Image (cartoon, rainbow, N blue to C red):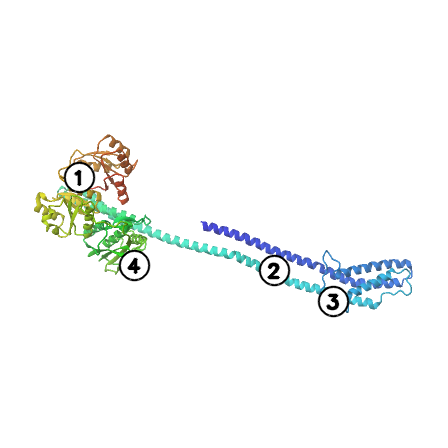
Amino acid sequence: MKSFDLLRKKIKQTYIVTLSLTIALLTFWFVWTQYYFYSLEGQPYIINIAGKQRMLSQRIALVGNALVSEPAKAKGEPLKSELVALTREFLHNHEILVGRVPVNEEFNALNGELEALYFSPPAMLDRQVSQYAEQALHLASLSLPLAMDAQPIGPESSKQILDNLDLAVSLFEKQLSENLRENHWWHLISWVLTLLSVIFAVRLLFTPLSRLIEAQFDEVKRAQLDARLEKEQINKLVATKEEFLASMSHEFRSPISAIIGVLELLPNMQEKREQLIQRAEQSCFRLLMLTNNLVDSMQNRQLDEEKDKEEFDLVRLLDDALSHFFYQCQEKGLNYEVFNETSLPHLVVGSPSPLSKAFKNLLDNAVKFTHHGIISVYNRVAVNDGQLILQIRVVDTGIGIDDAAKESIFDRFYKAHNKPKLYSGAGVGLYAARHQVREMGGDITVVSALNSGSEFCLSVPLQMPSEKEKHPVATAKGKFAVVDDQEITRLHLSYMIEQEGFAVDTYKSGAELLSNRDVIKDYDGIITDYFMPGINGTELANYLQAMLGKHTPPLILVSAAPQIANIVSNSEINAWQVFVKPIDRNRFIDALKYLSKPGYTLSPLPSSASILIVEDEPINAEILLDMIENLGYRGDVAEDGERALSKAGNNHYDVILLDLNLPDISGFEVATILNEQGTQAQMVAVTASAYETDRARSLATGMRYHLVKPVAYQELKNTLKLLLCKPVN
């Protein structure tokens, strides 16, 4: 808008200046022309006077001769008067012609020939005129009648002066003709110069304006091109959105249809009750996974998020990202492996959120486009000029990428396939991943061939923290064992345990743990993955129970499968806690601290516990209340923040389950007010907000844990088990 205002202002100024200059030049030319015509106005008059001089010279001669021959005094006096008048007029005209007397305040100018005629021999016309006039005046001064010896004006002198006067007339006419011709050329030259001046001025003024207009025109063309490209992008976005929504609708409807079908069949097929409930449960987890994928897809479009550098645990970030990848591979029947080609530092400085999203995008694509075979992940950290370079390679045996599409796959909304029903997505994942990584100073490259798999390489620079990382030293009484086939998970869990001052041993399989039978009973707890090759979690628990009986250390089971808690609860495994990856660090540490306390007990929890549910959605509140009562606790419900504050002030509650999005005040504000009032109840966020920022804010306002809806029954049971144990300091 500013550029067009500037253009309008420039055009206005240019027109004003051009018009003013043109008027000035034309005015100058008009004035000069008028002066030229005015200077020529006297020339015909001069020629007329010059011609009249011939007549006067003849008349003077005629009157003079008549005066000489007139005897009568009475007739002679008029002749004398006439002769004097003619002679004076003759002399006056002569003075005008030679430029001694002005005409209209202008003196006549003689050219060279006229100067020679009047003032140079042999003609000496100026002297001739003077002598001729003197002779006539002398004759007129004599008394009448004139004496017999009075000399009249002779024919020779009359003829001689007449010839010279004729020549003067010719020369004056010639001078006028030359002046006219010369002034004609000057007039033409002045017009040409004026015209050229106008053209030059116009060009001088309009050239920058023309450039400005061309620049504006180019800008308009670019804007039109951008608008066309944007329109194409919007059309592509709309088509992709419709395609994406159609795919999501189909994918969402499938588990929803299964859930509805199970609910309708349950009253009529009691003999298959367990199988139907299991199918409904699988469909629910499928629906939850789709919801999480949808949230991740929406986050991929937030490319301008804050990328402030901060200190974070690199191993935890990689393990959290890989946990969902492990589950996806298990669901699809794919083999997977993760290799740490170098040692990985825990604490680094960088931008964790965009790094995690980019890594998850590469993993999701590898699973999506691989139907059989194996997906391998290689992690490496190198040092270059004092800077850490993280390199992650994701290698799959999927459908591969054509050479022509290797760069296009990083374009927004580009899809290298034409099977939207088979490969759902918005076409922004790789675009967002490379954009985010390049914003951090890194890059994503690809090596692939059609039908031969792909290898994506993510590299990004990181910094070491300002303070050198110290290896944790065991300071607390407590020792734990970690059993997991994935090295990255063992590193993550052992680091968390060591950070709390506990000792830890790691095992890559159940068989390796069982081979150390003598030390197993010394552990305060065993943290093991449920789905492991060889001996899985159930088998490991059975072996430990058979080997150690009542001396078996408490088990904490972890898995990337969201249904793990229900699987464990329906089995004979006596697990102290069950965690779904990514692991809730607060709950995990609290579980360790409880187990490390001398004289801990796994006896049933007290049924007198009172729990307040703060939830504005009636169905959610009713389901949570049913869960709590089924667990043997007393429950109460508050529909909004004000009622929650009122009930918490008038009643004693052991636990408050607090929704964050309440109709009046937020759950954060409720937690802050309750803390200021000195509440003894332990607060837990129960919310649909799954972002890490919401989790951090919940903990900052004094809430112990952050549960994301939908809250599973077993997850709530395990959470309350920790909260209602002896307080953890």
Q: Which mark is residue 721?
A: 1
Q: Which mark is residue 236?
A: none
Q: Are marks 3 and 1 in contact (CB under 8 Å)?
A: no
> Which image quadrant is residue 438 in?
bottom left
- In front of the other: label 1 or label 4? 1
Residue 447 position (above or below residue 519): below
Sequence-wise, the earlier of marks 1 and 2 is: 2
Q: Is residue 358 left or right of residue 598?
A: right
Sequence-wise, the earlier of marks 1 and 4 is: 4
Sequence-wise, the earlier of marks 4 and 3 is: 3
- In front of the other: label 2 or label 3? 3
Q: Amino acid at mark 3?
A: Ala
Nearer-the-camera pick, 500 or 516? 500
Residue 422 visible to the viewer: no
Q: Give the distance between the C-alpha atoms of the residues marked 4 and 2, in whole angstroms.
A: 69 Å
Q: Which residue is mark 3?
A: 116
